[in-house]
Image (tube, rainbow, N blue to C red):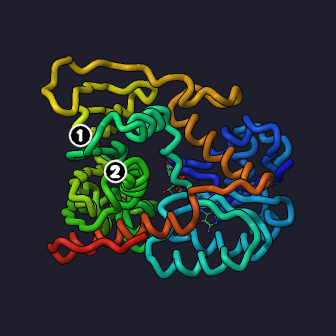
Amino acid sequence: MVRIGIIGCGSLIGIARNHIAAYQRCSDAQITACYDLIEGRAAGYIDKLGLKDARACASLEELFSLCDAVSVCTPNCTHTELTVAALKAGKHVLCEKPFAPTLEECDQAIRYAKLSDKVSMIGLCYRDIPGFVYMKQLIDEGKMGKIFFVREEQGGDRFANPAVQLEWRTQADLSGPGALADFGSHMMDICDYLLRDSCGPIAEITCMQSTCMEEREIIGKPGRLGPVTNDDVACWICRTEGGTLYNFTASRIGATFMLEIVGEGGKMIFHGDRPFELTLQLKDKNGPYTEKPQAVPVPESCYGGDENAPRTPFAINFYYEIRQFLDAIQHGRDTLLTLERGRYIQSLIQTAQDSADLGEILEADPE
Ligand SMILES: NC(=O)c1ccc[n+]([C@@H]2O[C@H](COP(=O)([O-])OP(=O)(O)OC[C@H]3O[C@@H](n4cnc5c(N)ncnc54)[C@H](O)[C@@H]3O)[C@@H](O)[C@H]2O)c1
């Protein structure tokens, strides 16, 4: 049994709930401790979710004394500090994405992870969304042939409401970039994961950003406005070493979650609101399009191997992420979601941010 501690119980979105729901499906894990910087939040959370075996902890040290592994579900600027603290205390760590606002912070955490024999993993959890698993299968089987171009859009709409207040996510010093890092981390991980073998790694990036609502109310100061210091919307284009263009849009003020891949073998489209389906319009690589696009269900073989897995969007990929973490801890299985991978994705985000700041096309670092 792996005893789990949750760091950061959540108030605004509260991704910790998704981690907990996934752990609860695993008979080899038990939530034993929760800690949040804001007093009372952990206790209220344990109560609300009925976590009978969990203690609300008054400090990180107390939490570490009650668990073997932690999920770090706190704002981006705290990720590496908490990851290092957990590793130093001898705990396995699953750290939420994006890894950290700066590469220096990522490097520091990686140094500690290398000195530790514990599992450390980054929460880039979209790879197990059934539609993406099916896309990978079709690409790896060669159905798409040469990839011509890729278009991906992702985001949320919570910030479309001007009444949403300034929060850590809107502050560059606490979050790093805004939509670019928040959604872009998943987006670049997915595209690179699906397509690197066909298209090569990302070689160049050009990015533009905008902040649509430049001021919002300061939390705890009714009527007083403060500046939003990162992007609401980011649009960026990457060229891969093989010459393929990836066209990305991330927006927190309204967006459609979709990924379209166009190649010699036709088109495939993933729709975020239908993660168990792809729209396919495949064709002979040497001929024209002859069929209309068709909605095709993802074969159960792409997600159905584990009967404890939920069948609901979002819950399913968190489940497989947590399963990977527990399997790495208990059976020494390798995870592809290493802190190094988190650092690489952060380097792409940093290059996109630098490109937007400088107004230049920039070369990306190799992985
Ligand atoms: N994987 C995904 O798809 C996904 C989705 C949403 C959020 N996230 C990530 O999860 C993280 C948390 O996001 P959220 O939306 O849950 O945030 P949130 O603001 O809802 O919750 C964060 C919680 O952390 C607490 N906290 C802050 N500093 C702390 C510290 N030093 N020690 C302990 N607790 C602390 C806060 O009090 C708050 O309760 C972010 O990094 C975000 O990018 C990932």
Residue 221 lies, in percent from the top left, at 42, 63
Q: Residue 197: percent from the left, percent from the top?
A: 39, 53
Query: What label sits on residue 161 in the rendered view?
Result: none
Residue that appears at 58% across and 72% down? 80
> Would residue 298 be found to the left or right of residue 144 on screen?
right
* Front residue (pair 280, 199): 199
Q: Residue at x 29, y 51 (%)?
A: 250
- In the image, 327 versus 235, the foreground residue is 327
Q: Residue 29 sits in which quadrant?
A: top right
Residue sticking out furthest to the front: 286
Q: Is residue 284 above or below residue 163?
A: above
Residue 46 position within the rendered picture, expressed as x and y whole percent measured from the top left: 74, 45
Q: Is residue 108 above or below residue 352?
A: below
103 relative to 292, above or below: below
Pointer 2: residues within 10 angstroms few (<14), some, or many (20+)? some
Location of mark 2 (residue): 198
Q: Which residue, given by chain and number where applicable, does mark 1 sit on?
A: 263
Q: Is residue 251 left or right of residue 109?
A: left
The answer to whether marks 2 and 1 mark residues whose Cβ atoms lie closer than 8 Å is: yes
Q: For ligand 1, tell me if the residue under mark 2 lies within 8 Å.
A: no
Q: Quadrant of residue 53?
A: top right
Ligand 1 located in image quadrant: bottom right
- Residue, x 62% and y 41% (percent of image)? 320
Find residue 157 and report its horizontal and vertical position in percent: 33, 42
Q: Reading the chain from its start, which is encountered first: label 2 or label 1?
A: 2
SS category of the residue bearing label 1: strand
Residue type of the residue flagged with mark 2: Ser
In the figure, residue 62 lies in which quadrant?
bottom right
- Find numbered disc 2 in the image and state the secondary structure of the residue it sits on: helix
Instruction: Determine whether 164 is above or below 92 in the image.
Output: above
Q: CA distance from mark 2 to mark 1?
A: 10 Å
Q: Residue at x 57, y 66 (%)?
A: 339
